[in-house]
Amino acid sequence: MMGSAEWEQGRDYVRALLSAQVEPLRRSQPMFAKGVITAMAELAIQNDQQLQDFTYRLFDSLDEILGIDFTADEKMPTPDSVERLYAGSGRGVQSSYMTILSILGKLRLPVGAHLMDLGSGFGRVGLTAGLWRDDIQFTGYEFVGHRVEASNQAAKLMGIDSRVRFVQKDLAMPDFKIPKADVYYMYDPFCVDTFRRVAGRLNQIAAEVPVTVVTKGDAGRLFISQATPGLWHDPELYDYGNLLLIRRREITRPENLKAHDHSIDR
């Protein structure tokens, strides 16, 4: 097992390497970023836990290449909200690039698939997916306005804004109905009440079309507790059981399935 000193040396080396390339590669940023993402994806699909542990936060400096700037968040006052907004968050709170690529590989997304991030933060999931695959669509919903603005700016910088877009939205609002997509990514983004409302909507969608939910830890267990019985497969566990991938079962008469009692209208 690689020691912590070696891990830190490797991490610092990659960060310095990426940081040094920002200015010289400014004009070719999208191509460079796509190359980095592609190379990382080849590492991510290897079923090597030690490698995944080593690379978990190794590529955080890719933020600089993508143009992601956490400065506004670091200065954000604690908001008057029950939502989990993680005021003052940064790289350590965002989903790691290797986690994103690893789970994207396991999703087996078909051409033209629509990936939706509910609580998209600074856009790492959408930017990574959009650079890795030029044949999928992405929509990210995020409560905090400056994060949405930063995410859309990064997507434009990377030249993927025609397929990757971020929208400011409070998913707890009763009048908002989450659109249909093929995959929903929710990295523990909401308070419990909002999560129940969202889970109710996803049950409704899954009763009509095949969908997959990616979530984590406590949020995953909460989603399972709200899931319509018989509608979903048992979760596939990754990242030491912290990351859950939950696919809808194949059903022949989705119209006969009723949403769980914890619906979005309650």
Image (tube, rainbow, N blue to C red):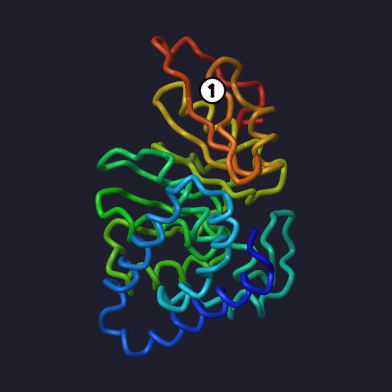
Left or right, 114 with respect to 239, comes to: left
Q: Position of residue 145 (x, y in %)?
A: 53, 67
Q: Secondary structure at mark 1?
A: loop
Identify the residue under disc 1: 233
When the figure is inspected, residue 3 is found, relative to residue 170, above or below; the finding is below
Where is residue 219 drawn, in percent x and y?
A: 67, 41
Q: Residue at x 39, y 25 (%)?
A: 209
User: Could you tell whether 251 is left or right of 76 in the image?
Assistant: left
Of 171 and 152, the residue lying toward us: 152
208 or 4, which is in the foreground? 4
> What residue appears at the point 64 percent right and 48 percent down from the top-left corner?
188
Q: Is residue 105 above or below residue 69?
A: above
**Callout 1: few (<14), some (14-19), or many (20+) C-alpha neighbours within 10 Å?**
some
* Three-letter residue code for mark 1: His
Vertical placement of residue 252 versus 201, above or below: above
One can see residue 4 in this view: yes
Residue drawn where x is 63% and y is 51% of the image: 189
Quadrant of the image for the N terminus?
bottom right
Quarter of the rendering containing residue 259: top right
Quadrant of the image containing the C terminus: top right
Q: Residue at x 52, y 49 (%)?
A: 48
Is residue 181 visible in the rendered image? The answer is no
Residue 29 pos. (x, y %): 31, 77
Q: Position of residue 135 (x, y in %)?
A: 25, 49
